[in-house]
Image: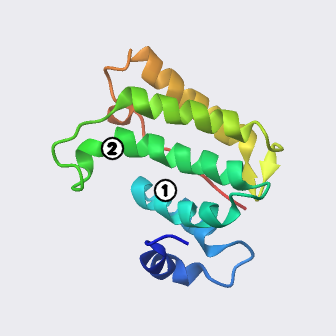
């Protein structure tokens, strides 16, 4: 548990009682809404409980994926009004997420990891093609992730 657990529990309360942990489902809800910072925090709460279990790196990968998008959206977030997008750190987090997902089967906890790794690869290529000077979010729609 983290010091943020209270607001996280409130944020995902409507997802309780489903077949998967509400924080896991809440990650996807936040991510798909473009709330990457919140997605990161929601899943981090679950990751903190699972650090010594086999799914720890799976959760860490998704947290890093969301963190990459936090870096791309820093100019939009009132928490960092003077900040701009941080393209190289985003690429670094995407790359780390890709590596961690490599430890898991192609379909894990309802998430198609082949598709997810392909998405990560696309965003790394976008950043590289722009030579880390162009934020791909200015040209490409934000991604979504679907969990079954």
Q: Residues within 10 Å of mark 2 (few under 14, many from 20)?
A: many
Q: Which residue is mark 2?
A: 73
Check the image and report above or below for 5 versus 68.
below
98 vs 4, nearest the viewer: 4
Query: Which picture quadrant has residue 51?
Result: bottom right
Q: Which residue is mark 1?
A: 40
Which percent across, then down, holds residue 113?
A: 73, 43
How many neighbours does mark 1 have within 10 angstroms: few (below 14), some (14-19), or many (20 or more)?
many
Q: Residue at x 58, y 30 (%)?
A: 95
Residue in the picture at 80% in, 44% down: 104
Q: Position of residue 102 (x, y in %)?
A: 75, 36
Quadrant holding the C terminus:
bottom right
Marks 1 and 2, how far apart at CA? 13 Å
Residue 100 falls left or right of residue 10: right
Q: Quadrant of the N terminus?
A: bottom right
Q: Quadrant of residue 116?
A: top right
Residue at left offset 59%, top offset 34%: 96
- Percent of width and height locating residue 43: 56, 61
Of discs 1 and 2, which sits in the foreground?
A: 1
């Amino acid at each position: 548990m983290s010091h943020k657990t209270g607001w996280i529990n409130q944020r995902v309360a409507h997802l309780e009682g489903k077949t998967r942990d509400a924080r896991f489902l809440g990650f996807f809800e936040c991510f798909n809404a473009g709330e990457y910072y919140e997605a990161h925090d929601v899943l981090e709460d679950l990751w903190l409980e699972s650090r010594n279990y086999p799914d720890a790196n799976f959760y860490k990968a998704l947290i890093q994926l969301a963190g990459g998008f936090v870096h791309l959206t820093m100019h939009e977030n009132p928490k960092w009004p003077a900040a701009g997008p941080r393209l190289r750190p985003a690429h670094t987090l995407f790359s780390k997420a890709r590596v961690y997902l490599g430890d898991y089967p192609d379909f894990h906890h309802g998430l198609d990891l082949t598709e997810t790794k392909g998405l990560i690869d696309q965003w790394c290529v976008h950043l590289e093609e722009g030579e880390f000077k162009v934020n791909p979010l200015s040209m490409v729609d934000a991604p979504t992730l679907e969990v079954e």
